[in-house]
């Protein structure tokens, strides 16, 4: 049985592309909320904000505190929270931690990485009315070594499709396809009734997600699928340089900016 979040997202499939972006704070969330359907508090905050070399180092308290901040900036879109590594190893642990996140952050759903291996956990969460988004393909919490896109071979395609259908059967309201070959992404999207959200997985998906800091040019990422829509680093430097010059000259603060 679909949750309210599930019903809202399902309406989007085949009707309009789903826009999804990440946020880790109120200020960014407020701006994203004007345009995005889904706002993900991603465990990507580990690399973006804390310079971690893996999302495995992100813990539950980090996710909860950042999600509380994001929640203050989200009024229109649906807020989804990543469950960090080692917080959903079994049904009881998953339910306890997901309930904690839902209650403390007031989010609209949570996201888990995995396919057939988490089918039972997803069903257990759905039984307790916790909306779940899936995530297959490259799953950063389980990757060791260099990232490599998925779905090139027929065996990989079949396994990815089985994972997607397993998650659909378990009750997820959508599934993220990360770095999956374009034809495989197309086949998955056309084979399941729930929406697919792509990241590096072609425009055949029902929607797209990017890390907001990447598209704004705030990071130095060289990932193939990232398109930079702005160069905020340059704008920030210019503003700080102007501030420095004003301070050095003594023109700031002027009477206008003084009590």
Image (cartoon, helix red, strand yellow):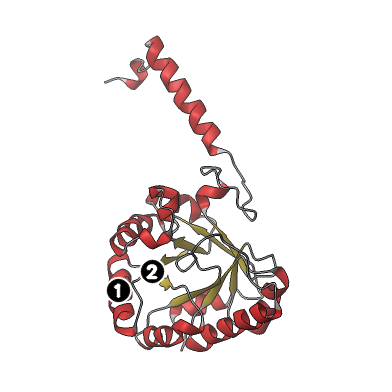
Q: Nearer the viewer, residue 3 or 155?
A: 155
For mark 2, what is the residue? 83
Asked which secondary structure carries label 1, the reply is helix
Residue drawn at x 27%, y 67% is: 104
User: Where in the figure is residue 229, as x and y percent of width and height?
Assistant: 62, 46
Q: Is residue 207 visible?
A: yes
Mark positioned earlier in the residue sequence (1 or 2)? 2
User: Where in the figure is residue 223, as x and y percent of width and height?
Assistant: 60, 52
Q: Nearer the viewer, residue 206 or 61?
A: 61
Residue drawn at x 42%, y 54% is: 45
Image quarter of residue 256: top left
Residue lying farthest top? Answer: 249
Residue lying farthest front? Answer: 145
Image quarter of residue 109: bottom left
Describe residue 82's horizontal placement relative to residue 158 as left or right. Answer: left
User: Where in the figure is residue 41, as x and y percent of width and height?
Assistant: 42, 60
Residue drawn at x 36%, y 59% is: 57
For mark 1, what is the residue? 97
Asked which secondary structure carries label 2, the reply is loop
Describe residue 13's horizontal placement relative to residue 105 as left or right. Answer: right
Compared with 32, 233 (above or below) is: above
Distance CA(mark 1)–CA(mark 2): 8 Å
Describe residue 124's horizontal placement relative to residue 170 as left or right. Answer: left
């Amino acid at each position: 049985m679909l949750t309210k979040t599930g019903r809202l997202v399902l309406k989007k499939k085949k009707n309009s592309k789903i826009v999804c972006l990440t946020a880790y704070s109120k200020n960014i969330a407020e701006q994203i909320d004007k345009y995005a359907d889904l706002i993900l508090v991603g465990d990507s905050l580990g690399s973006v904000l804390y310079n971690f070399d893996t999302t495995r180092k992100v813990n539950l308290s980090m996710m909860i505190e950042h999600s509380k901040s994001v929640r203050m900036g989200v009024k229109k879109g649906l807020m989804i929270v990543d469950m960090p590594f080692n917080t959903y190893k079994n049904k009881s642990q998953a339910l306890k931690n997901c309930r904690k996140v839902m209650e403390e952050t007031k989010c609209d759903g949570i996201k888990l990485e995995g396919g057939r291996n988490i089918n039972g956990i997803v069903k257990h969460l759905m039984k307790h009315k916790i909306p779940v988004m899936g995530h297959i393909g490259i799953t950063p919490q389980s990757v060791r070594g260099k990232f490599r896109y998925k779905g090139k071979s027929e065996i990989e395609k079949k396994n990815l499709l089985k994972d997607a259908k397993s998650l659909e059967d378990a009750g997820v309201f959508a599934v993220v396809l990360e770095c999956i070959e374009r034809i495989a992404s197309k086949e998955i999207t056309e084979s399941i009734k729930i929406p697919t959200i792509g990241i590096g997985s072609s425009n055949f998906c029902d929607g797209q997600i990017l890390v907001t800091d990447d598209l704004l040019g705030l990071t130095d990422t060289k990932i193939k699928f990232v398109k930079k829509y702005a160069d905020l680093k340059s704008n920030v430097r210019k503003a700080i340089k102007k501030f420095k010059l004003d301070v050095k000259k003594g023109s700031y603060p002027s009477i206008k900016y003084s009590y």
